[in-house]
Amino acid sequence: MSWKDYIKQNMFPLFTCSGCTHGTVTNAFVRVADELKLDKDKTVIVCAIGCAGRIPTFLDFPVLRVTHGRALAFATGIKLSRPDVKVIALMGDGDALAIGGNHFIHAARRNIDITAIVSRNEIYGMTGGQYAPTTPPGARATTAPYGMLEPAFDTCKVAEGAGATYVARSDAYHVQHLQRTLKAALQHKGFAVVEVLTSCPTQFGRRNNLADPAKMLERIKEMTVTKAQAEKMTPEELAGKFVIGEFVNTSRPELTDIYAQAFAGMGV
Amino acid sequence: MGRSFHIEINTKWCKNCGICLAFCPQKVFTWDEKQRIVISYPEKCTGCLLCEYRCPDLAIEVRKVEEEESHE
Ligand SMILES: Cc1ncc(C[n+]2csc(CCOP(=O)(O)OP(=O)(O)O)c2C)c(N)n1
Ligand code: SF4
Ligand code: SF4
């Protein structure tokens, strides 16, 4: 087996724009899938709508594609009915945190054994560049022509606050770190969240003087700091930066185990 | 001794985004006159695999060339 066995090669090239680093997450994901030898008969990928949500349809797994924002709702159903199956939700930031924000916090609260990978390109790519709850203050979007006026979500803090037992951030520039992080998340038992900073040269870049894919990735390189670097920085220096690394790695009772235990011996 | 890494770009999948070119530590890639990626200095490749891992279109493969193959 190689990573190529985890993609539908006959569907390639990807539909994405040139330099869309959602594809870099896919790249890392399939390598890690190969490294962990994920069993395709025992793994389900759930995705929804958006550019990040469409890419998983190019993966050679059982893939369930559902309504926008509902990847985790369907993933929860699959996991509860088949606790023996590994369930992975691949989402965009709008998908996971705007329309899907409710499912996101409750999946975390329940600590259901699902790996949630959120590609944060800070915009709604597929629908033409509307702002997302992750759009950085000041950035231009079709719905923020004078620059984004609202603050953005810190996905990792939301996940941690809601009870996720694995929370980490990585990005499309630090690709080896990205692979290590996805590997750890996929091996975690409980609700695991990885936010990956990605770049959308088309809908974010073009409006923000970053249409060149390499420049967009350079921006990610510049806005990320490791936990060790962050510890030595002042709050002013940290403004606008994203810390990459693991924030939570703990364990507590997992939802399907709780259910199994509650109904053990009751014949249900 | 010949070069020890073979780089291949799947031109059917590559979208010439330039990410491999911009971030290759050895500056192995260049643009041609039509803004397409060219593997110009493969002999400089150290096999770090960063282009292969960063490519958003899964279009690059870097492979170690076995000793015998490299005696060209
Ligand atoms: C119920 C519903 N509401 C809204 C939409 C329109 N819509 C499609 S994709 C999308 C957001 C895409 O942004 P994101 O999830 O961040 O993914 P990206 O395309 O940026 O990867 C929206 C609002 C929809 N398809 N369905
Ligand atoms: S619109 Fe943005 S997110 Fe969608 S494929 Fe293009 S670059 Fe990627
Ligand atoms: S990173 Fe990939 S898609 Fe982009 S130019 Fe290089 S080979 Fe082509």
Image (cartoon, rainbow, N blue to C red):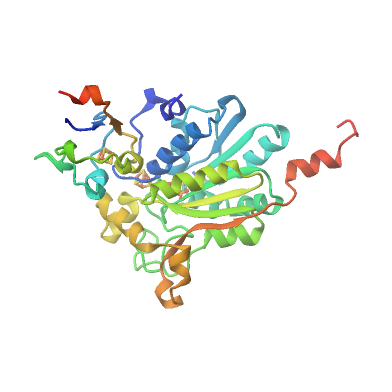
Give the image quarter of residue B55: top left
The correct choice, above or below, for A34 with respect to A134 in the image is above
Q: Nearer the viewer, residue A133 or A10?
A: A10
Answer with left or right where residue A7 lies relative to residue A252.
left
The correct choice, above or below, for A154 with respect to A120 in the image is below
Residue lying at 26% horizontally and 51% vertically, measured from the top left: A214
Give the image quarter of residue B15: top left
Q: x%, y% of residue A120?
A: 45, 53
Q: x%, y% of residue B57?
A: 33, 37
Q: x%, y% of residue A229?
A: 43, 67
Q: Which of B66 and A33 is in front in this view?
A: B66
The C terminus of chain A lies in which quarter of the figure? top right
Q: Nearer the viewer, residue A157 or A166?
A: A166
Q: x%, y% of residue A194?
A: 52, 50
The correct choice, above or below, for A138 with respect to A131 in the image is below
Which residue reaches farthest left? B33
Residue lying at 86% horizontally and 38% vertically, measured from the top left: A263
Q: How many discs mark residues in the rendered view?
A: 0
Q: Which of B67 and A102 is in front in this view?
A: B67
Q: Can residue B40 be seen in this view?
A: yes
Residue lying at 27% horizontally and 46% vertically, measured from the top left: B19
Answer with left or right where residue A242 lies relative to residue B53.
right
Answer with left or right where residue A137 lies relative to residue A155.
left
Q: Is residue A91 visible?
A: no
